[in-house]
Structure formats: C-alpha cells, structure tokens
Amino acid sequence: MNMRFILIACRVLLGVVFIIASAHKILFPGDFAEAVFQYRILPDALINVTAITLPWIELVVALAIMFSARFKDGAALVILLMLAVFAAAMSFNLLRGLEIACGCFSVGDDVEIIGWGNVLRNVGYMFLASAVLAEDWILQRVGKDGGWRF
Amino acid sequence: MKDSRKPGNLWTRALFLVIAGGLTGLLVNALRPAGGIELFYPWSMRVEARAMAEDIPIVSLEQVREATETGSHMLIDARIDTEYQSGTIPGSLSAPLSRIDEVFLELAMFVIPEDQLITFCSGPDCDEALMLALYLRDQGMENVSLFVGGIEEWLAADLPLEGAP
C-alpha cells in the first residue's frame, strides 16, 4: 500500500477523532470542567480555563492536521503532546485508584470511566501522530517500490 | 530540509495553533448567550473535594441503592425535619444537623462504632451531610461514608422516596 496514502489516512483519522472529542466539550463546557476537576491534578485557577480552551485547541489542531499542508506537522506535535498528557493523567489516577469520568469523547451523565484501555488507545493515536510528524522523513526513506531506503 | 512554504519552525507552528484555539475558546465563552462559564471557580471548596481531603469515603448512587435493598448500611438524612418528612431515601433515619447533639443521643442507642453509615442531604451543593459525617466520625463512628448526590441524584434516577406525600 502506498505510504503517502497511509499517512493521509492517519491525518484524517486523527482529525476525525479530535473533532468528535471536541464537540461535546465545546457544547457543554461546565460538564467538561467537572470532568477536569475530577482528575484532581490542576489547581482551581486552571480548571475552568482548561475546560474553555482545550476543546477549541483540539478542534483547531484537528482541522489543521486534515486540511493544512503548512500546519499539519505543528498540529501533529500538539496532538502528540496532548495525548501524552492525557495518558499520563489517566495513568496517574488509575494508579491511585480513582474511578472517574474519562472526559475523552463525552461529558456529563452516562460517561465512559477511565481504564487502561483508554491509555492504550491514546498510545495508539500517539503512534499515528508521530508518523504524521515524521512524514517527510518517512517519505524520503520509502522508495517507489514501497521498500525502505537507509 | 526546511520547507519554505511553512511559517516559522515546528514549535512556532504548534504554538500558533494552541494560541489560536485557546483564544477562540475564550472568545466563544465570552460570547455565549448565557455568558459562558466563569474563568475561575473554587472547585476545591466543593463538598466532594472537601470530603476527600477529610478522608470521608464517597459512595455512588448504585451503592446507596444496594444498601437500601440489602440493609448493609444505615442511611442517615442530614436535612431538617420538614424536608425529611416530605420524603426521603427508603429506610433512612433523620439526623438534622441543626440539632445534632440532641439527635445523636437517640442515635447512639442503636448504633455501634463499627456500623456502616451513609449520610446524605438534598444534593451535591449542600454540605450538611459532610458536616454530619465529620461529626459522627468525631463521635467515634468508624465507618461513615457520604452520598454526595443526595436526594437530587436519587430522584434523577427515578427512584422512589419513602414518606413522600
């Protein structure tokens, strides 16, 4: 399969995931603030600011990674860092035994509770973001026959 | 090799996206019809946070529902008498915080320190149940938990109240 096509698929997948992830949080910032609070990591002063700004950052990087040739690598870097922070925050709370709402895709009542599956899913997305970030490097090393050049 | 079509370096482009998203979020929040959410809210003053800081365990609606069915815990309503009489979680005792010293003397006749107690009040914004839990613990009760959602969460789950008119 063409490597360029795989990398485009990675960008589209990450973009769609982050648009979906941002939508509910943008619509219900109060519920998302509650989810951020439940993580018990940020001080009071940063909880609502995070709840207000983070979903929009997710949306902007989702659009950039899908549609902007100039900003796709910057978007991939932000996505990679966000996923690393989210995975670390979930792992921290899982290790200290808190059963809290993930705050990943939906907020409010009837939400997904954090688990190691969420952490693994984030690590998977981090691989995709890393591939987009290293797109130029990867394409330089893939020959026209699809083989690697070192 | 640097791509001349791309503005700045990688970190600058990433920072630009973060700032663009963040500013958009702040702007949209300010322009929301209901005024958005406040930039600062004293989350650590919330009942749940204070309970955790005081090492009072928090129980879920499901655990409370199980307790009403199995009798594994004693449920204690911290609201005032008139609220208790207007309907409470089935099987609950009344121990209004406003006259707790008097009520505890009655309560102490049929509870022992090892009993499993759950306190609750009207909902997540009231703090009488937390105050009651702290009081009971100070009086030597060893297993006091808090149902933060209280009557509000109980009713939201369409569960019946006992003694409701």
Image (cartoon, coloured by chain):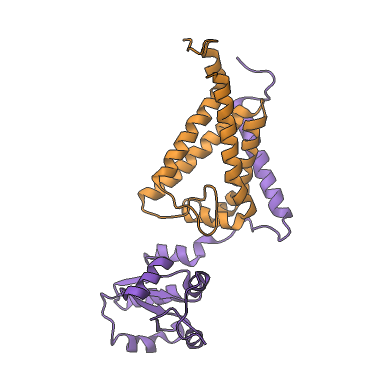
Chain colours: A orange, B purple
Indicate the position of residue A145 as horizontal and vertical percent values. 52, 10
Q: Is residue A35 visible?
A: yes
Q: Nearer the viewer, residue B44 or A24?
A: A24
Q: Nearer the viewer, residue A73 or B56?
A: A73
Q: Residue at x 60, y 51 (%)?
A: A24
Q: Is residue B145 above or below residue A122?
A: below
Indicate the position of residue B140 as horizontal and vertical percent values. 29, 76
Q: Is residue A76 above or below residue A82?
A: above
Q: Residue at x 45, y 39 (%)?
A: A121
Q: Is residue B136 above or below residue A17?
A: below
Q: Is residue B11 visible?
A: no
Q: Quadrant of residue A68?
A: top right
Number of numbered labels in the structure image? 0
Asked whether, in this view, residue B54 is left or right of residue B11, the answer is left
Q: Residue at x 35, y 74 (%)?
A: B69
Q: Quadrant of the N terminus of chain B?
A: top right
Indicate the position of residue B20 as horizontal and vertical percent values. 68, 39
Q: Residue at x 39, y 79 (%)?
A: B76
Indicate the position of residue B106 as horizontal and vertical percent values. 33, 89
Q: Residue furthest front?
A: A1
